Image (tube, rainbow, N blue to C red):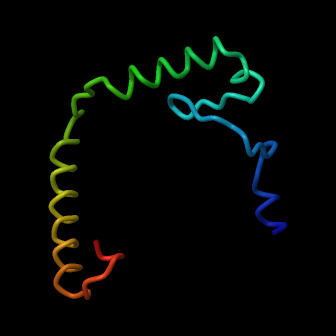
Amino acid sequence: MQNIVALHTGPIQADMTYGSKNEHRSKEKMGNPQIRRTAMSYNLENNFTYHPPKGDQQERYEKLRAKAREYAALILDFCPYSRERE
């Protein structure tokens, strides 16, 4: 346990909220309704906005989906029917 604590460089805060690009917002800032509403509005706009693929991102994602489909087929072929398989 000492090794884990020694590696942590900042204060431990269990109630942190993550915003865009992993910016940390403290509980005090997020307690302000205006700041909270602004952060939530940004997240809504960002979440429901089309983000076109960059560079070879589309090709890489297609390869990942194809491999994931192969893996899913293996699971269906080799694992017995169960709640976890579905």
Question: Where's the C terminus, which quadrant?
Answer: bottom left
Image quadrant of residue 39? top right
Question: How many callouts does the rendering have?
Answer: 0
Q: Residue at x 60, y 30 (%)?
A: 23
Extreme-top residue of the structure? 34
Relative to 30, does residue 6 appear above or below in the rendering?
A: below
Q: Position of residue 62 (x, y in %)?
A: 15, 51
Relative to 86, does residue 24 appear above or below in the rendering?
A: above
Answer left or right for 7 relative to 25. right
Q: Position of residue 61 (x, y in %)?
A: 21, 49
Image quadrant of residue 7? bottom right
Extreme-right residue of the structure? 2
Q: Position of residue 74 (x, y in %)?
A: 19, 80
Answer left or right for 45 relative to 20. left
Relative to 68, does residue 40 appear above or below in the rendering?
A: above
Q: Residue at x 37, y 29 (%)?
A: 47
Q: Residue at x 76, y 63 (%)?
A: 4
Q: Residue at x 21, y 88 (%)?
A: 78
Extreme-front residue of the structure? 83
Q: Position of residue 35 (x, y in %)?
A: 64, 15
Answer left or right for 39 relative to 50. right
Answer left or right for 8 relative to 25. right
Question: Where's the N terminus, which quadrant?
Answer: bottom right
> Which is nearer the eye, 34 or 55?
34
